[in-house]
Image (cartoon, rainbow, N blue to C red):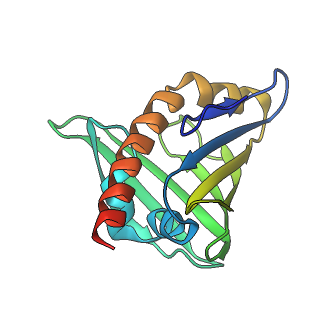
Amino acid sequence: MQTKNTTKITADEGKQELFIVREFDAPRELVFQAFNEPDLLLQWLGPKDMEMKIDRMDNRTGGSYRFVHSYAGGGPEFGFNGVIHEATEPERIIRTFEFEGLPERGHVSLEFLTLTELPGNRTSLHIQSVFKSVADRDGMIQSGMEGGMNEGFAKLVELLAEINATN
């Protein structure tokens, strides 16, 4: 059973997919905007000790994106890119995701992000990521994905509360 506003990651052994579930105390339209609008995305996506820049972001069906994360004090940069297969406001984004830091290209996952309205202006986020192989899925989990995602979601919670307070 999931506790309110905690992130649950499910990755069954031997399967090429993982699932992420999280609730937010914000309306679905606002959560969708936070995932879709560059100025909002820059404020929360990624670990707290990293900065992000957007090289390209065309969040529409048929569009594409490329983000680069780097440490505030310098060091290596980490690029991520993908293609948007569907963007249906305010409920769904389907896109590919590729981390550019691997020795070879082609380790792409397909992400299905779904936002569901909950009572009291709350939103449930469900992400299903399907990987090319079990090894790719396990590599993503072992990369520290969970910690970085939770740090990003913590920043998102603060951003959503700030926006909700001004509306």
Q: Nearer the viewer, residue 73 or 94?
A: 94
Looking at the image, the residue that sits furthest to the left is 73
Where is the C terminus found, in terms of image quarters?
bottom left
Q: Residue 120 location, x and y as percent? A: 57, 60
Q: Residue 127 location, x and y as percent? A: 68, 49
User: Residue drawn 59% across and 39% down?
Assistant: 104
- Vertical side of 86 occupied by 19: above or below: above
Looking at the image, the residue that sits furthest to the front is 120
Q: Residue 64 location, x and y as percent? A: 55, 70
Asked whether residue 45 is in view, the answer is no
Question: Which image quarter: residue 77?
Answer: top left
User: Residue drawn 17% across and 37% down?
Assistant: 74
Q: Residue 151 location, x and y as percent? A: 39, 36
Q: Nearer the viewer, residue 21 or 135?
A: 21
Number of numbered discs on residues? 0
- Vertical side of 136 occupied by 152: above or below: below
Q: Is residue 21 left or right of residue 156?
A: right
Q: Is residue 67 left or right of residue 82?
A: left
User: Residue drawn 80% across and 35% down?
Assistant: 16
Q: Nearer the viewer, residue 44 or 135?
A: 44
Where is the N terminus found, in terms of image quarters?
top right
User: Residue drawn 48% across and 38% down?
Assistant: 149
Looking at the image, the residue that sits furthest to the right is 14
Question: Which image quarter: residue 96?
Answer: bottom right
- Vertical side of 143 occupied by 150: above or below: below
Asked whether residue 164 is in view, the answer is yes
